[in-house]
Image (cartoon, rainbow, N blue to C red):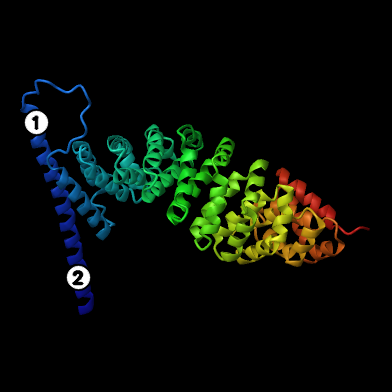
């Protein structure tokens, strides 16, 4: 009982201390704003200059600006120590937004304000509240005022990414307005890895919206993202963020051609090789390459750059990492649409790697779909079919069909894979029947009577696997 009382008293003391810190940070912010208002009144009362300059003056720091920057730092520290309270997030955000507007002339104030808004947007509810308070125009104004300041541009990009997590926010006009500023920051700060990573991350977020894929391209964003990849080949964060942005942008066919024209495919392949030990880079790069190689010309370019072998190496090295496996299998599926790449995949050990991946992730529908799709795409000749059969592909595909009976994508890819693997070899057809594949394909026909793909490939598999009378 005494221990419980002591614990309760300790918790109460910590809570009171956090509350005092929150109140102190809020009071300090309000005091800084009050000093700014007093200084602004004094300036307004002064007579105007006799000979005003016709040029637009550079932003000038206002009284209290340094205090505002310092207290933004204090506010972020308080947020880290008591995240549940969030200092009544909307009140804190309003103070920060007012301070950013009052202190537009100090780069440090804009940087600290953007960073503070980023941390305040920690939850979907906080993000929505900040967007409603016009946080996106505020951070955009910071970047417009200080385009040459790397710290401001980096903080601006981080804030945009934090404020556009919601699909609804990505499509807002004030989010779209940030796109040319992000692309401009990439061009202006090519040597600053932190700016390159932050801007690419923000463009990745915005390009998840279909309309923004074209908006980013119109602003020159595809070439800027590829330039980031090429300028910082050894920086894992830049490679991950830029590859992620390219993945979303390349879902638009025109952007696949734009990226290829400025060396994007070679840059992504280089990332796969340079960062072979980084699962996050490999997942992003495989995803980018998967979307880039939907067209035939890019499939050939990727093969010349060593994509097939690099992706298989990633699959083998990180077979226990579901994200890498899913994107790598999907990438091999896309690459193997080109006939020369089917043989390259089989020769480089792709069949064995995919089968091991299927076995390693039996409960991942995404891995099972992409893995079965890869086998389906590659096994178009007797050599690949025999190699897949020898690696245990039939049993692995049957297990996928059995594990995901109501997943149409898995059923279509699995039935297609079985039809190709057992296309002409009697021993492979017999193995498929022993694995229960015939009954699984018949069940797929019954489960998805209106799905064209399932119906087509399940019927094809049933025809191949039904013994001749």
Give the percent coordinates (x, y) of residue 308: 64, 55
Q: Residue at x 54, y 44 (%)?
A: 264
Q: Is residue 49 left or right of residue 121?
A: left
Q: Residue at x 79, y 62 (%)?
A: 386
Question: Residue 79, can we see it?
Answer: yes
Is the residue marked by circle 1 packed among few (<14), some (14-19), or many (20+) residues within 10 Å?
few
Q: Quadrant of the N terminus?
A: bottom left
Return the residue at label 1: 43
Residue in the foreground of this view, choosing between 326 and 87 = 326
Local SS, label 2: helix
Local SS, label 1: helix
Residue in the foreground of this view, choosing between 217 and 100 = 217
Q: Is residue 211 left or right of residue 196?
A: right
Q: Quadrant of residue 464?
A: bottom right
Q: Is residue 109 left or right of residue 226?
A: left
Q: Is residue 175 left or right of residue 239?
A: left
Vertical position of residue 381 compared to residue 108: above or below = below
Give the percent coordinates (x, y) of residue 125: 35, 47
Return the residue at label 2: 10
Vertical position of residue 376 compared to residue 103: above or below = below
Task: Compare marks 2 and 1 and give the one earlier in the sequence.
Answer: 2
Give the percent coordinates (x, y) of residue 113: 25, 45
Q: Residue at x 50, y 56 (%)?
A: 281
Q: Quadrant of residue 309?
A: bottom right
Give the label, 2 or 1, closer to the camera.
1
Q: Quadrant of residue 36?
A: top left
Q: CA distance from mark 2 to mark 1?
A: 50 Å
Count of numbered labels shown in the rendering: 2
Residue in the foreground of this view, choosing between 203 and 311 = 311
Residue in the foreground of this view, choosing between 190 and 95 = 190
Q: Quadrant of the C terminus?
A: bottom right
């Amino acid at each position: 009982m005494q221990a419980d009382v002591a614990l309760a008293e300790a918790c109460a003391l910590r809570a009171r201390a956090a509350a005092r810190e929150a109140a102190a940070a809020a009071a300090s912010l309000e005091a800084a704003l009050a000093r700014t208002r007093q200084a602004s009144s004094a300036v307004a009362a002064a007579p105007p200059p006799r000979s005003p300059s016709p040029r637009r003056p550079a932003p000038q720091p206002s009284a209290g600006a340094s205090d505002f920057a310092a207290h933004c730092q204090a506010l972020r520290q308080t947020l880290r120590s008591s995240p549940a309270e969030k200092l009544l997030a909307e009140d804190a955000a309003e103070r920060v937004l007012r301070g950013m507007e009052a202190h537009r002339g100090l780069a440090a104030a804009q940087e600290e304000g953007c960073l503070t808004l980023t941390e305040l947007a920690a939850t979907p509810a906080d993000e929505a509240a900040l967007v409603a308070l016009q946080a996106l125009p505020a951070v955009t104004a910071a970047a417009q005022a200080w385009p040459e300041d790397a710290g401001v541009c980096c903080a601006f990009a981080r804030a945009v990414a934090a404020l556009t997590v919601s699909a609804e926010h990505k499509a807002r006009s004030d989010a779209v307005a940030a796109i040319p500023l992000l692309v401009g920051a990439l061009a202006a700060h090519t040597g600053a890895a932190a700016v390159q990573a932050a801007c690419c991350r923000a463009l990745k977020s915005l390009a998840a919206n279909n309309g923004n894929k074209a908006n980013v391209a119109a602003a020159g964003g595809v070439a800027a993202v590829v330039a980031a990849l090429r300028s910082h080949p050894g920086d894992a964060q830049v490679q991950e963020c830029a590859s992620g942005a390219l993945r979303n942008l390349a879902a638009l066919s025109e952007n696949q051609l734009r990226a290829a024209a400025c060396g994007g495919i070679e840059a992504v392949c280089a990332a796969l090789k340079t960062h072979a030990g980084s699962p996050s880079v490999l997942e992003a790069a495989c995803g980018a390459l998967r979307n880039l190689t939907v067209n035939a010309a890019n499939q050939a370019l990727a093969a010349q750059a060593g994509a097939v072998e690099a992706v298989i190496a990633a699959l083998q090295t990180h077979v226990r990492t579901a994200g890498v496996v899913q994107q790598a299998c999907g990438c091999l599926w896309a690459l193997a649409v080109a006939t020369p790449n089917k043989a390259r995949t089989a020769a480089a050990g792709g069949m064995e790697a995919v089968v091991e991946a299927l076995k390693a992730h039996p409960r991942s529908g995404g891995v099972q779909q992409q893995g079965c799709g890869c086998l389906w795409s590659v096994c178009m000749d007797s050599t690949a079919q025999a190699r897949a059969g020898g690696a245990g592909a039939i049993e692995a595909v049957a297990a996928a069909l059995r594990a995901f009976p109501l997943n149409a994508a898995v059923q279509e890819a699995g039935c297609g894979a079985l039809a190709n693997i057992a296309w002409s070899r009697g021993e492979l057809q017999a193995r498929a029947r022993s694995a229960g594949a015939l009954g699984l394909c018949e069940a797929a026909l019954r489960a998805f009577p209106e799905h064209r793909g399932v119906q087509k490939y399940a019927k094809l598999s049933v025809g191949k696997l039904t013994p001749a009378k």
